[in-house]
Amino acid sequence: MNTPERLTDIHNGYILARVMPRHDYTDHVSKHRNPGLRLLFLLLGCLCVALGIAGAFLPLLPTTPFMLLAAACFARASTRFYNWLLNTRTFGPSILEWRLHRSIRYRTKLIAIATMAATLTISVVLVIEQPWLQGTLAVLGVLLATWMYRLPSRDAPRRTHRSEQEP
């Protein structure tokens, strides 16, 4: 069921209204029976959204895992907050891709790995002085990048096998 959401644009000093379709994801929500736990899930979801938004601006704080966790919390607490999060242009498509297909977009994956590599390199080279800690951070970064790269991506470019290539 699509319900309209009003958006506004300012054009030559006039406010113009547009209608953007909203999707209802109520069937994804399975609220917990205990009201106290629902409140806890709601508060944790809000905290995860705040951390995810902060992660969009802070290079060492990841955004997507916090938004996925927020969606999971909201799915157990509130239909309204879950629908709001999944209907956002910024986070909704990534959350839906994970919830429906257990995959992340290829471009998102590459950007995350590149950002992580850059921040870890800066940390290892400029910030951390102990060699054992530099090595530990480097190994953890390689392991995390390998894990992330191995996550499925439905839009990844197809690889051709040697048997399919022209001789």
Image (spheres, rainbow, N blue to C red):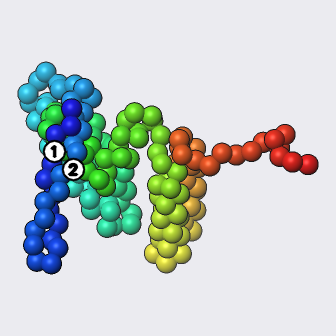
- Residue 29 point in image, percent of width and height: 23, 29
Q: Residue at x 24, y 38 (%)?
A: 23
- 114 above or below 5? below
Residue 132, quarter of the rendered image: bottom right
Q: Residue at x 24, y 26 (%)?
A: 27
Left or right of residue 165, residue 136 in this image = left
Compare residues 155 and 116 and report the one nearer the observer: 155
Furthest residue in direction right, as rendered: 167
Q: Earlier in the sequence, mark 1 or mark 2?
A: 1
Residue labelled with disc 1 = 4
User: Badge 2 local density, few (<14 within 10 Å), some, or many (20+)?
Assistant: few
* Residue 39 visible in the picture: yes
Residue 8, quarter of the rendered image: bottom left
- Residue 3 point in image, percent of width and height: 16, 40
**Disc 1 vs disc 2: Cβ atoms closer than 8 Å?**
yes
Residue labelled with disc 2 = 20
